[in-house]
Amino acid sequence: MRYLALACDYDGTLARHGHVDDRVVASLEELSRSGRRLLLVTGRQLPDLEHAFPRLDLFDRVVAENGALLYRPATREEIPLGQAPPPGFVERLRAHGVDPLAVGRAIVATWQPHETAVLEAIRELGLEWQVIFNRGAVMALPSGVNKATGLQAALDELRLSAHNVVGVGDAENDHAFLSLCECAVAVANALPSLRAQADWVTRADHGAGVVELVERLLASDLEELGPALSRHAIPLGHAGERLLTLDPYAPNVLVAGTSGSGKSTFTTGILERIAERGYQYCIIDPEGDYQNLGIVSFGDAGQAPALDQALQLLEEPDQSVVINLLGVSIEDRPRTFETVFSKLLALRAQTGRPHWIVIDEAHHMLPEHNLRAGEILGPAAHGLVFITVHPDHVAHDALAVVDRVLVIGHSPAETLRQFGETAGVRPPRVDPAPLATGDALDWPVNSRAAPLRFVSIPPRTERRRHTRKYAEGELPPDRSFYFRGPDGRLNLRAQNLAIFLQSAEGVDDDTWIHHLRRGDYSRWFREAIKDPSLADDISRIERMPDTPPRETRRLVRQQIEKRYSAPP
């Protein structure tokens, strides 16, 4: 469910001439029974509102006084969100002959044509106050207080994201809170400026328009309005002058490419832009590739993630999280992934979040032999990003839910072929030439369109080398180094740099020199550790034929420790 809450204006929206019809009340009751939250966002003062509409119990929160007062109907608590009118302000308005004049906890309200007198009083007293209009109403409020700030305070209390809210209004003072909502709706009688801003305008006016909105929410969760919400789209890159974007809600994405092609960097750029738009994400990170995103990470090379703490943090809408499985043994990671993912889906069912779930090394988390992948992902999988170097090693049922394939690296045609054969779709024909660094292919799987080549938007900052992962973590067997020796009699596995250095000191000289002369060390640093700079320096050591084994060991260790904080 995308929309977990409805935020409504009162006068001119729910109410006509201050009265709410019984049909509108029944519609709100039905929406509440669907599990959605209801919020009332109004310029009225609370006593006046309670007198006009005694059914405030329908709402989880009421934002009154145009954002200056938060009311909890269940407990009848009032929380001021703005300072009281300063001394002398009300007296000055009365002296100017402003009548009628209503004074709330923070708001001071009157009607046109008294806006000039209100502005003059603010200027004369040197106040940092603002004037907001609502059709004929004139409202003076502390600077920065409006319906959007009041709604945000209500959402914070309910731990809801504005991206899971649809708002509906009719007048000038509704612009702010509708801009905050994921979907902005105007009733048919709304001012032209508000109708122009809205993502959708109801056919009916006033409360009947709200009923129309509720009926569509219950029927389809407003899925049909998705194309109208392009203002939320996530930029991917540019194909000439065309900007490629990603729908922030519906699709499942596969990021695939050859080893060392920069999949993590590419994905980091997308996640930065997802975060900039206020969406929440969670990365399931089996190899510690996402420790430098500036968000909280749970787990490291030495310990498994504290899952309960991660889920607790994710209950806050503005907190994204990395769940690092580096401290979980390789054979246990798929089972741990299932546990983590099931809990994330349960949280999403309650809160609509995290909006995005990123599954790195998908061929390890959902391997091809996993016959339960469809059951694990669920029947309504959405907002998933799978990242893999081996699409043909990912479970068929996982690839079957992919809507967009983003390909980078040296073998785009082969990557798409692997995806197509495993997912059971015909892969498109593409130029087999390697993609340049920063270039990518975008293929909408369920479209007849050919893959489109584009230049991706890079992350704002370069990602630093993940020293702990390579120094102390556990690389999978296919990326570990094996000291075998000239006769293949050994099989010493080094799954990280610390063990590599320990093994390098312990193996005999013939074994050490055998791998050195073959260029095995620089190849491993380049392909598995993905550090071309280290690989180049080690390659130079490999080309020093007269240097004794003891000295080459020392030089190799020196180069590793210079970059990776002296592994033990």
Image: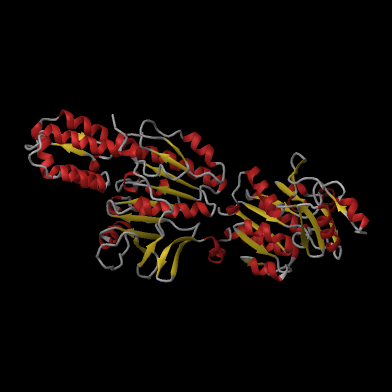
On the picture, is 86 further left or further right than 383?
right
Which x, y percent locates residue 420? Answer: 30, 60
Left or right: 533, with 339 as reference point:
left
Quarter of image, res 511: top left
Front position in the image: 161 or 351: 161
Could you say which is closer to the camera, residue 467 or residue 448?
A: 467
Q: Is residue 412 left or right of residue 406?
A: left
Where in the figure is residue 33, as x and y percent of width and height?
Answer: 66, 49
> Of residues 243 and 73, which is closer to you in this image?
243
Residue 416 location, x and y as percent? 30, 61
Instruction: Determine whether, in the image, residue 374 is placed left or right of residue 184.
Output: left
Q: How is the image coloured?
A: secondary structure
Q: Position of residue 193 (x, y in %)?
A: 69, 69
Q: Is residue 496 visible?
A: no
Identify the image quadrant of the C terminus. top left
Label count reads 0
Residue at 57% over, 42% down: 316
Whether residue 392 is visible here, answered yes or no, is yes
The quadrant where residue 16 appears:
bottom right
Q: Is residue 396 above or below residue 335?
A: below
